[in-house]
Image: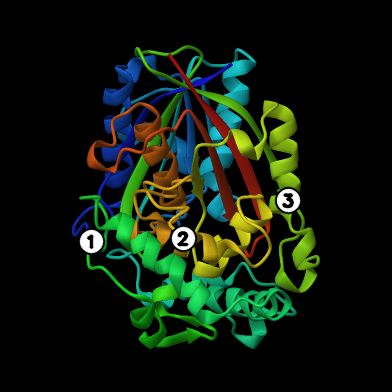
Amino acid sequence: MSFITGVGLTPYGKHEGSSSLDLMSRAAQLALDDAGLTRAEIDGVLCGYSTVSPHIMLATVFAEHFGIRPAYAHAVQVGGATGLAMTMLAHHLVEAGVVRHVLVVAGENRLTGQSRDASIQALAQVGHPDYEVPLGPTIPAYYGLVASRYMHEYGVTEEDLAEFAVLMRAHACTHPGAQFHEPITVADVMASKPVAMPLKLLDCCPVSDGGAAFVISSERTGADGVRIRGCAQAHTHQHVTAAPALSELGAEISIARAKQASRLAISDVRYAAVYDSFTITLAMLLEDLGLAGRGEAAARVRSGYFGRDGRMPLNTHGGLLSYGHCGVGGAMAHLAETHLQMTGRAGHRQVRDASIALLHGDGGVLSSHVSMFLEQVR
């Protein structure tokens, strides 16, 4: 058994003059304060990778910078799934008795500390070095290809995809730490400039500065507990040219394994936090996870099903699409918001019931997947 005892999250957007280590440290201290722990009580550190500070020993560089001497340190790299993969690893380390309190941390000054061209070049390396990279595709281009195929197979339209951007922006407007606070409409998404058709600017997450951190512990440190009930991974491919059929991607595999590990069903879930690097990512994952039928997720958005007051509140902080995306820390904001919801501390964003939550992370081009169920314990 393991508990998420504290979370820390900076605002996302521009943090002029702050390095990646500064942002990581800020989030880490917030998480420790939230857990009621001191730095000396942290005996494990898991650190996400950074494209701005690609140090080969980033976990121990951070530990030195933050002033801790952990008994266990490790860095993890599985793209956007890294945050949940680190949480899963921390869960197993705690269950095995290796450590008592693991600090999971990531952050980057990706917006102010890296040029546009450098960012594009770094992210393009997810492509196959022989069959993809020489052709010059970017991450949006890969997802644009996936979107075109998905729209063809399941009758999804560009207007359908736009609904997810509108929902995430509506949720971000209620969070003071979000990068964007201006409401948008489907028409706004459709009129935004093309990036990689059918994806337009507002179908894509922004580049952000920010940091996020959690503490995973062997026992709860406060009155309200959030327990990791079960989790699982799946890795079907790395490169899009080697991807299986759309109906056989890793999300379906990881959620099946996580349901088995947790002994829970989708019908038990009351709150969802799902990776949303692009509108097509969110649409596909919601359907792969069983939160909507094939081609039906957009209709559920329109009906209010995924709204704060709906049957399945989703990414109530605004997700990657509108809260922001600072690399590994981007998806970690999903878990931070989930923890606030599960402990009744989300303020005016608070949902009616977050007793069982489902989180899902996606790395690469739908390549690496982590599904996780959290349970409220009182």
Q: Say the numbered circle drawn on residue 303.
A: 2
Compared to residue 318, the image places residue 164 above or below, namely below
> Looking at the picture, how far across and down is residue 9, in whole percent?
31, 41
Please tell me which residue is depicted at 27% across the width and 65% down the height of the picture.
112
What separation in Å lies between label 2 and label 3 (alpha carbons)?
A: 25 Å
Seen in the picture, residue 103 relative to 116 is either above or below; the reply is: above
The residue that disc 3 covers is 252
Q: Distance between the residues labelled 3 and 1?
A: 36 Å
Three-letter residue code for mark 3: Glu
Task: Please state the horizontal and vertical placement of residue 109, each as a whole percent of the image.
Answer: 31, 57
**Element under label 2?**
loop
Residue tagged by mark 1? 14
Expressed as whole percent of the image width and height from the top left, the position of residue 371 reads 62, 42
The amino acid type, in three-letter code, at marker 2 is: Ser
Q: Splitting the image into 4 quarters, where does residue 124 fall? A: bottom right
Q: Indicate the secondary structure of the residue bearing disc 3.
A: helix
What is the total number of numbered labels drawn onto the structure image? 3
Circle 2: is it few (<14), some (14-19), or many (20+) Cα within 10 Å? Answer: few
Q: Please, what is the three-letter code of the amino acid marked with disc 1?
A: Lys
Image-based side of 290 in relation to 301, left or right:
right
Q: In this view, does 167 lie to the left or right of 242?
A: left
Question: Label for residue 149?
Answer: none
Q: Nearer the viewer, residue 314 or 200?
A: 314
Mark sitting earlier along the chain (2/3): 3
Query: Which of disc 1 and disc 2 is earlier in sequence?
Result: 1
Residue 204 in view (yes/no): no
Q: Residue at x 71, y 71 (%)?
A: 240
